[in-house]
Image: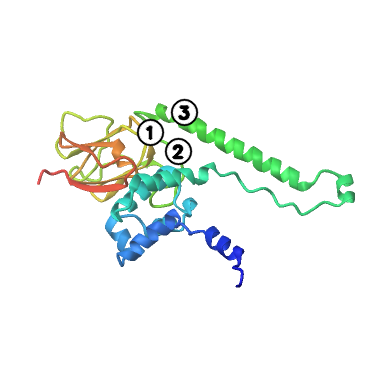
């Protein structure tokens, strides 16, 4: 009677089942529906390059974590995936918690050690100082952001164009014609006709287009308020749950849900 091979059973018991990553789950769900990245991008208004970044988990190609979470929520909701689970997995694997890779060690001969300090030490010190300065500057901007309330907003984070944008700007209020010009103001005026009023309850990326011309674009702090006059308006926000709108004196409410990227068009003529 032949003795069995005990290692064979052990190998079978120790076999591991490969679990799909977060990006692979998104790709599998999309392909199961027979959709291309372009098909999905057209439906949910998120550029296909960002969708590809989610499926490959290349978060740096998308931008700041707040935008990655917004895109993940919208994409997961469209594919009928568990939205909160997808965001939780991203938070656990967020690249923001990752440390920069160590500098390569090419080895130093005894003669080189005696001749002086390795240049890699100086390079590492310069990189460390630059990172500390960058973090300090970003923290200063975040602390100074509330002071921008009522004035010209300042861009805090540079992001890929067109969404998120690199810088924030407010177009000058020079009127080309009395009927079609947009005149921004900090609060609703007595004349609420042909007016859209925007108020931020949370920090958000925002773009306002009045009569086909961009009037406001960038990342703005909570408390920012602007009123624009014209015939039509298009509002796009990266954190739509923090954007409240009023059109011709009537409250529209929030533009969308927290973290969602939403774009809506409004007629200001009352037609």
Between 8 and 158, the one lying in front of the other is 8
- Characterize the local packing of mark 1: few (<14), some (14-19) or many (20 or more) Cα atoms within 10 angstroms: many
Q: Is residue 123 left or right of residue 52?
A: right
- Characterize the local packing of mark 2: few (<14), some (14-19) or many (20 or more) Cα atoms within 10 angstroms: many
Q: Position of residue 112 (x, y in %)?
A: 86, 49
Q: Position of residue 189 (x, y in %)?
A: 20, 29
Q: Are marks 2 and 1 in contact (CB under 8 Å)?
A: yes
Q: Is residue 200 above or below residue 117?
A: above
Q: Is residue 116 above or below residue 30?
A: above
Say which mark, if any, is on residue 17: none
Q: Position of residue 32 (x, y in %)?
A: 32, 65
Q: Position of residue 199 (x, y in %)?
A: 28, 33
**Residue situated furthest left in the rendering:** 271
Instruction: Tell me, yes or no, if residue 218 can be seen here.
Output: yes
Question: Mark 3: which secondary structure?
Answer: helix
C-alpha separation, residue under disc 2 versus residue under disc 1: 9 Å
Between 103 and 136, the one lying in front of the other is 103
Say which mark, if any, is on residue 221: 1
Say which mark, if any, is on residue 156: 2
**Residue situated furthest bottom in the rendering:** 1
Say which label, 2 or 3, has the lower sequence index. Answer: 3
Question: Mark 2: which secondary structure?
Answer: loop
Question: Mark 1: which secondary structure?
Answer: loop
Residue at image location 59% in from the left, 68% down from the top: 4
C-alpha separation, residue under disc 3 versus residue under disc 1: 10 Å
Image quadrant assignment for residue 31: bottom left
Q: Are marks 3 and 1 in contact (CB under 8 Å)?
A: no
Instruction: Tell me, yes or no, if residue 167 can be seen here.
Output: no
Say which mark, if any, is on residue 143: 3
Residue at image location 61% in from the left, 67% down from the top: 5
Between 32 and 267, the one lying in front of the other is 32
């Amino acid at each position: 009677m032949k003795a069995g091979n005990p290692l064979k059973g052990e190998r079978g018991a120790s076999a591991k089942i490969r679990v799909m990553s977060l990006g692979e789950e998104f790709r599998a769900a999309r392909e199961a529906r027979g959709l291309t990245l372009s098909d999905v991008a057209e439906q949910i208004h998120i550029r296909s390059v960002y969708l590809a970044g989610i499926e490959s988990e290349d978060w740096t190609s998308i931008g700041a974590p707040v935008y990655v979470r917004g895109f993940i929520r919208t994409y997961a909701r469209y594919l009928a995936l568990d939205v909160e689970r997808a965001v939780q997995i991203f938070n656990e694997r967020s690249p923001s918690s990752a440390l920069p890779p160590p500098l390569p060690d090419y080895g130093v001969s005894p003669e080189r050690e005696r001749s002086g300090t390795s240049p890699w030490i100086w390079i590492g010190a310069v990189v460390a100082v630059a990172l500390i300065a960058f973090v300090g500057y970003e923290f200063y901007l975040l602390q100074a952001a509330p002071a921008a309330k009522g004035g010209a907003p300042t861009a805090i984070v540079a992001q890929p164009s067109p969404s998120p944008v690199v810088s924030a700007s407010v177009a000058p209020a020079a009127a080309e014609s009395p009927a079609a010009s947009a005149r921004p103001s900090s609060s609703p005026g007595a004349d609420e006709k042909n007016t859209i009023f925007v108020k931020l309850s949370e920090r958000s990326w925002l773009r306002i287009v009045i009569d086909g011309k961009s009037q406001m674009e960038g990342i703005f702090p909570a408390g920012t308020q602007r009123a624009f006059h014209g015939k039509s308006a298009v509002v796009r926000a990266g954190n739509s749950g923090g954007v409240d709108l009023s059109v011709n004196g009537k409250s529209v409410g929030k533009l969308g849900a927290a973290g969602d990227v939403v774009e809506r068009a409004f007629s200001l003529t009352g037609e």
